[in-house]
Image (cartoon, helix red, strand yellow):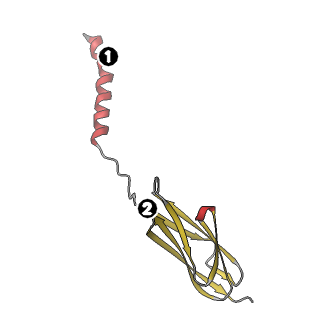
Amino acid sequence: MRSVYFSTLPALLLAGFLAAGCATSTNLGDTSPDITLHASSKSVFVGDTVTLSANSQNLLGKDARVEWQCPGGKVQTAEEGRMARVVFSQPGSFSVAAVLMVDGREVKRESELIEVKKLP
């Protein structure tokens, strides 16, 4: 009888752990599409290039792309639109926006303000 007790103990313990694991829920956090933006510099001189990178999250299986907007600057994209290089020809303050588009509609917009100074 004793040997039966010891051989079933691991099975009972395993069943208890599995049942406890099934009873708890796992919080995966926010799963909505998101984008963050990083600029190589926020203060440049006229003619300098600012590189901006967009990092997206929670887009698995979705048709997503990043559109860049920058009135006052010339934008060239790279890395399938995840990176933008912007050159400004005039001094001033300019907003560069990365717009996250999912299935053809805007879901999030992030921007950086870039201060462009006259050449010394």
Q: Which residue is mark 1?
A: 7
Q: Which residue: 56% across, 73% down?
A: 68
Q: Residue at x 33, y 28 (%)?
A: 14
Q: Residue furthest top?
A: 1
Question: What is the secondary structure assignment of the residue under circle 2?
Answer: loop
Q: Is residue 75 above or below residue 32?
A: below
> Going 30% across and 11% down the picture, which residue do you hit?
3
Q: Indicate which disc, 2 or 1, sits on the residue closer to the N terminus.
A: 1
Which residue corresponds to mark 2? 33
Question: Of discs 2 and 1, which sits in the foreground?
Answer: 2
Which x, y percent locates residue 47?
72, 82
Q: Position of residue 77 (x, y in %)?
A: 63, 69
Quadrant that contains the N terminus:
top left
| Residue 29 as seen in the image, left or right of residue 8 | right
Which label sits on residue 30? none
Q: Nearer the viewer, residue 93 or 14?
A: 93
Give the image quarter of residue 96.
bottom right
Q: Residues within 10 Å of mark 2 (few under 14, many from 20)?
A: some
Amino acid on which the number 2 mark rests in the picture: Pro
Q: Amino acid at mark 1?
A: Ser
Spatial separation of the CA atoms under disc 2 and disc 1: 50 Å
Across and down, in percent, residue 106 comes to 44, 70
For image coordinates 61% across by 66% down, the residue present is 83
| Residue 34 occupies quadrant | bottom left
